[in-house]
Image (cartoon, helix red, strand yellow):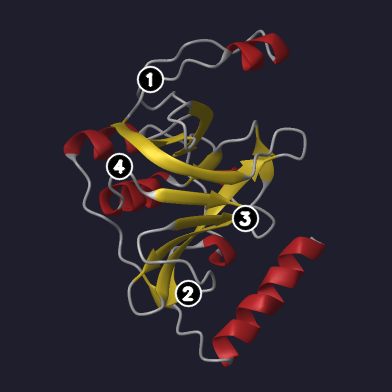
């Protein structure tokens, strides 16, 4: 509760200081997106974690993704010192990751094959084909380190939209499905990602 009050005050202060919050329209979606997202759970969008174009708070070059885990926000830096801000769910303290990576590949409605470490922690998890029951949701961006190795961390959609704004995942960055589709459409392979 204290976290939400803090961000409500921060949001109000930003609005008063001329931060220029501008809603970003929903992206175009395919018929498959429409069909499968209709089968997924719904949750109201908390205004603190809604998709907005704002003044860039990162100072990074345009085209960079910056994830501020404590804020539960992902920023995609635009030209002219602007950014699109998306609310996210992040890894809880035991599973969080920080560092710099690159989007090595992208996938629509990806399959999910949990890594061995996750299967050891939670034996009930198993391979799930892409679709409305898949925890990766509508899109995934696969993060690789500077040596070209898979970090096993992803920026992806979710079938638990009610958890956006929380620290609940096993390390990956979850987004609402419309948000991850919007980001996916903007971001090419090779995009630099900073997780802090």
**Image quadrant for the N terminus?**
bottom right
Q: Please indicate whether residue 54 sits to the left or right of residue 90 in the image.
A: left
Image position of 38 with respect to 8: above or below: above
Sequence-earlier tag: 1 or 3: 3
- Residue shown at 22% from the left, 33% from the top: 32
Distance from the alpha carbon under mark 4 to that under mark 2: 22 Å
Image position of 157 with respect to 76: above or below: above
Circles 2 and 1 in contact, beta carbons < 8 Å? no
Sequence-earlier tag: 4 or 1: 1
Circles 1 and 3 in contact, beta carbons < 8 Å? no
Distance from the alpha carbon under mark 4 to that under mark 3: 23 Å
Q: Is residue 139 visible?
A: no
Q: Which mark is residue 111?
A: 1
Circles 4 and 3 in contact, beta carbons < 8 Å? no
* Residue highlighted by disc 2: 56
Q: Which of 194 and 179 is in front in this view?
A: 194
Q: In which quarter of the image is residue 103?
A: top left
Sequence-earlier tag: 2 or 3: 2
Q: Which mark is residue 4?
A: none
Image position of 158 with respect to 67: above or below: above
Distance from the alpha carbon under mark 2 to that under mark 3: 16 Å
Q: Give the class, few, some or many, for how many residues have Cα within 10 Å of label 1's Cα (few <14, many ≥20).
A: some
Q: Residue 72 carries which label?
A: 3
């Amino acid at each position: 509760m204290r976290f939400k009050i803090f961000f409500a005050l921060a949001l109000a202060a930003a609005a008063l200081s001329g931060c220029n919050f501008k809603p970003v329209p929903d992206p175009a979606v395919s018929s498959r997106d429409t069909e499968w997202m209709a089968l997924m759970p719904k949750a109201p969008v908390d205004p603190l974690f809604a998709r907005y174009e704002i003044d860039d708070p990162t100072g990074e070059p345009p085209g960079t993704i910056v994830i501020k885990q404590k804020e539960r926000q992902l920023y995609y830096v635009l030209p002219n010192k602007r950014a699109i801000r998306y609310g996210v769910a992040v890894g809880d303290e035991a599973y969080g990751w920080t560092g710099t990576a690159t989007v090595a590949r992208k996938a629509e409605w990806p399959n999910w094959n949990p890594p061995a470490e996750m299967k050891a922690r939670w034996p009930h998890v198993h391979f799930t084909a892409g679709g409305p029951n898949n925890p990766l949701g509508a899109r995934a961006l696969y993060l690789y380190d500077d040596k070209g190795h898979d970090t096993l961390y992803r920026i992806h959609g979710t079938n638990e939209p009610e958890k956006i704004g929380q620290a609940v995942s096993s390390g990956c960055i979850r987004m609402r499905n419309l948000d991850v589709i919007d980001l996916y459409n903007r971001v090419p392979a090779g995009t630099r990602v900073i997780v802090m």
